[in-house]
Image: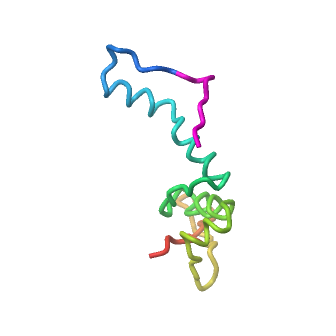
């Protein structure tokens, strides 16, 4: 299968160095977008990302994995069992409380 997007077509100039061309391709981020399209249509599996912790813990990572295709998620991840649940309320430095989400998923080994 070949997909060509002529709307954003750009050809490397003769005087453009490999480094300049690689930066142009990277900055357009078209490769990542194409990989996601192929993944969503089941032509390929995207590389499973490792758990990433953010400001509220693993909330964004958990949501991303839970929104994925079930077959892909089951192939690459397993649920994390945590006694007491995955949501914890922590004291913040201002005297208030904040939610911290522990990882619900981990990569299979």
Query: x, y percentage for residue 76?
Result: 54, 69
> Residue 104 versus residue 10: which sits nearer the camera?
10
In the figure, is residue 23 to the left or right of 61?
left
For residue 25, above or below residue 34: above
> Residue 15 versus residue 84: which sits nearer the camera?
15
The residue at 43%/26% (across/down) is: 24
Q: Quadrant of residue 67?
A: bottom right
Q: Is residue 75 magenta?
A: no
Query: x, y percentage for residue 23?
Result: 39, 29
Q: Does the magenta stretch include residue 7?
A: yes
In the figure, is residue 42 to the left or right of 76?
right
Q: In which quarter of the image is the N terminus?
A: top right
- Image: magenta residue range: 1-9
- Number of marks present in the image shown: 0
The residue at 56%/63% (across/down) is: 58
Query: x, y percentage for residue 64?
Result: 63, 58
For residue 86, above or below residue 46: below
């Amino acid at each position: 299968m070949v997909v060509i997007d002529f709307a954003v077509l750009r050809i490397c100039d003769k005087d453009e160095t490999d480094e300049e061309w690689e930066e142009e391709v990277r900055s357009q981020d078209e490769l990542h977008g194409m990989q996601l399209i192929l993944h969503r249509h089941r032509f390929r599996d995207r590389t499973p990302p490792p758990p990433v912790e953010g400001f509220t813990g693993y909330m964004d990572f958990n949501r991303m994995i839970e929104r994925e295709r079930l077959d892909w998620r089951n192939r690459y991840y397993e649920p994390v069992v945590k006694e007491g649940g995955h949501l914890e309320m922590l004291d913040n430095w201002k005297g208030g409380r904040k939610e911290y989400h522990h990882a619900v998923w981990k990569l299979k080994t």
